[in-house]
Image: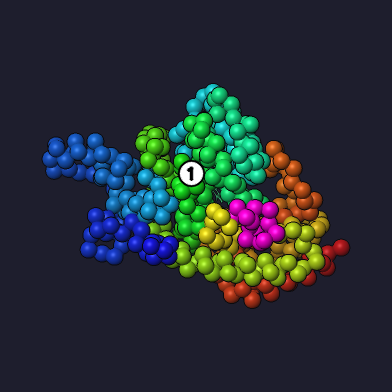
């Protein structure tokens, strides 16, 4: 079955939907049982999509969990109140005091801060590695390395990692691999086929797709699901039925939304390639991108998110660029229907294992579902403002 078709069917088992097209929205803390036998059965199967207690989920959650497993290819899926909780939940499920974690240097900045502050205080040692390291990750493995964390492409600078090469090395050493797969959404990359043990989604982004819900998922393979399930439960992670329902609704249109995000983003990239002010465009679908060959091998397409570096630009010029946009709103996050812009003046402070080569500021765009002509006109005006500042 092709991905767009899978998105329509995912999680719509009769066991969850009953007679309706969609699973009902079931809000619950207490689940009640008629017989002692039923209660004991539920207790024995809690965590495996059997109603037991609200924190373990209801049919609404089970439908989303089933959908994520069908789409990403995992054995079980834990839900979290946001993507960052999925990151912490997955890391804490597999790490303990005295452990060593290898973390990709291009990782989402709050994940870096989690390692440097929280994991450190728990006695867990983080070492950052070059996103382009590939099989040479073997050189960084220590006897206490328990987890290798990947994010590909990096969601600010778009380095593409050799996921299969890194996972193959990890397997030889019995190390758990966790991938932040948010950029690909559940459809542009098949993490388990590439050898990943746990795949994380900030569902907040493309799955929900409308910038109105925070939600995270972590899907694990057969071997790692029991530990992820039990630890996430014991740490108290859960999500509301309303948010799970909204995420399921988002999934149904993800295919067509992503196609449009991709098409418009590539048109904006083409236009930016002609601009003399632009030093570099970071988009993995560009043949000139250093990770393009691996991207073509491991991903089935791209989305609406990419960055570009300007040759130069001071604070005033960048403010002139990003202020006064008609369509690109200034703000973090991405994956909604609307276009967004953010600027980073200096990237090196977010890198410790590698050197960021560009001197100029970096602008990140999320290309939304507006007509691309309007978006390009908005950017053209931004360049006029930028160029008019001395
Ligand atoms: C947004 C994001 C997260 C965090 O998700 P929240 O729902 O905002 O907590 C994690 N990883 C990546 C790559 C993200 O873009």
For image coordinates 62% across by 50% down, the residue present is 160
**Quarter containing the C terminus:** bottom right
**Quarter containing the N terminus:** bottom left
Structural crowding at the residue carrying mark 1, measured as other residues with C-alpha within 10 Å and reported as few (<14), some (14–19) or many (≥20): some
For image coordinates 31% across by 41% down, the residue present is 47
Residue of label 1: 195
Residue 299: x percent and y percent? 54, 56
Is residue 116 within the magenta segment?
no
Q: Which residue lies furthest to the left in this view?
A: 35
For image coordinates 77% across by 51% down, the residue present is 358
Residue 344: x percent and y percent? 71, 52
Front-lying residue, 192 or 124: 192
Residue 130: x percent and y percent? 66, 41
For image coordinates 28% across by 39% down, the residue present is 46
Asked if residue 378 shows in the view, the reply is no
Q: Which residue lies furthest to the right in this view?
A: 390
137 with respect to 193 (left or right): right
16 with respect to 133 (left or right): left
Front-lying residue, 233 or 354: 354
Q: What element carries label 1?
A: loop
Asked if residue 170 shows in the view, the reply is yes
Q: How is the image coloured?
A: rainbow
Is residue 284 within the magenta segment?
yes
> Quadrant of the rendered structure where residue 310 is?
bottom right
On screen, 365 above or below 86? below
67 with respect to 122 (left or right): left
Magenta stretch in the rendered image = 282-295
Residue 186: x percent and y percent? 46, 55
On screen, 91 above or below 316? above
State yes or no: Cβ of the residue under disc 1 lies below 8 Å from any atom of ligand 1: no
162 with respect to 309 (left or right): left
| Magenta-drawn stretch, dominant element (helix, strand or loop) | loop
């Amino acid at each position: 079955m092709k991905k767009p078709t899978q998105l329509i069917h995912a999680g719509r088992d009769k066991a969850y939907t009953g007679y309706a097209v969609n699973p009902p929205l079931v809000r619950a803390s207490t689940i009640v049982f008629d017989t002692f036998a039923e209660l004991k059965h539920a207790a024995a199967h809690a965590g495996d999509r059997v109603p037991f207690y609200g924190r373990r989920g209801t049919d609404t959650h089970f439908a989303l969990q089933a959908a994520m497993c069908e789409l990403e290819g995992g054995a079980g899926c834990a839900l979290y109140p946001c993507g960052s909780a999925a990151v912490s939940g997955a890391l804490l499920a597999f790490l303990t005091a005295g452990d060593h974690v290898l973390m990709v240097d291009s990782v989402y900045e709050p994940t870096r801060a989690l390692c440097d502050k929280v994991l450190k205080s728990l006695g867990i040692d983080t070492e950052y590695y070059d996103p382009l390291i590939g099989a040479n990750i073997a050189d960084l493995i220590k006897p206490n390395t328990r987890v290798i964390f990947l994010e590909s492409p990096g969601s600010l600078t778009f380095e593409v990692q050799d996921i299969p090469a890194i996972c193959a090395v990890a397997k030889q050493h019995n190390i758990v691999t966790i991938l932040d797969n948010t950029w690909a959404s559940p459809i542009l990359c098949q993490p388990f086929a590439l050898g990943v043990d746990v795949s994380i989604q900030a569902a907040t982004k493309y799955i929900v797709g409308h910038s109105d819900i925070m939600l995270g998922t972590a899907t694990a393979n057969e071997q790692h699901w029991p530990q992820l399930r039990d630890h996430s439960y014991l740490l108290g992670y859960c999500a509301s039925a309303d948010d799970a329902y909204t995420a399921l609704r988002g999934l149904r249109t993800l295919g067509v939304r992503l196609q449009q995000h991709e098409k418009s983003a590539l048109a904006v990239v083409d236009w930016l390639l002609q601009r003399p002010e632009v030093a570099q465009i970071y988009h993995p679908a560009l043949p000139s991108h250093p990770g393009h060959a691996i991207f073509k091998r491991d991903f089935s397409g791209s989305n609406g998110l990419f960055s570009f570096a300007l040759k130069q630009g001071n604070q005033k010029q960048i403010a002139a660029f990003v202020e006064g946009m008609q369509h690109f709103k200034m703000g973090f996050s991405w994956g909604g229907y609307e276009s967004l812009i953010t600027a980073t003046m200096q990237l090196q402070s977010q890198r410790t294992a590698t050197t960021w080569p560009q001197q100029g500021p970096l602008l990140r765009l999320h290309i939304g579902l507006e007509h691309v002509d309007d978006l390009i006109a908005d950017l053209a005006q931004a360049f006029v403002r930028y160029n008019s500042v001395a």
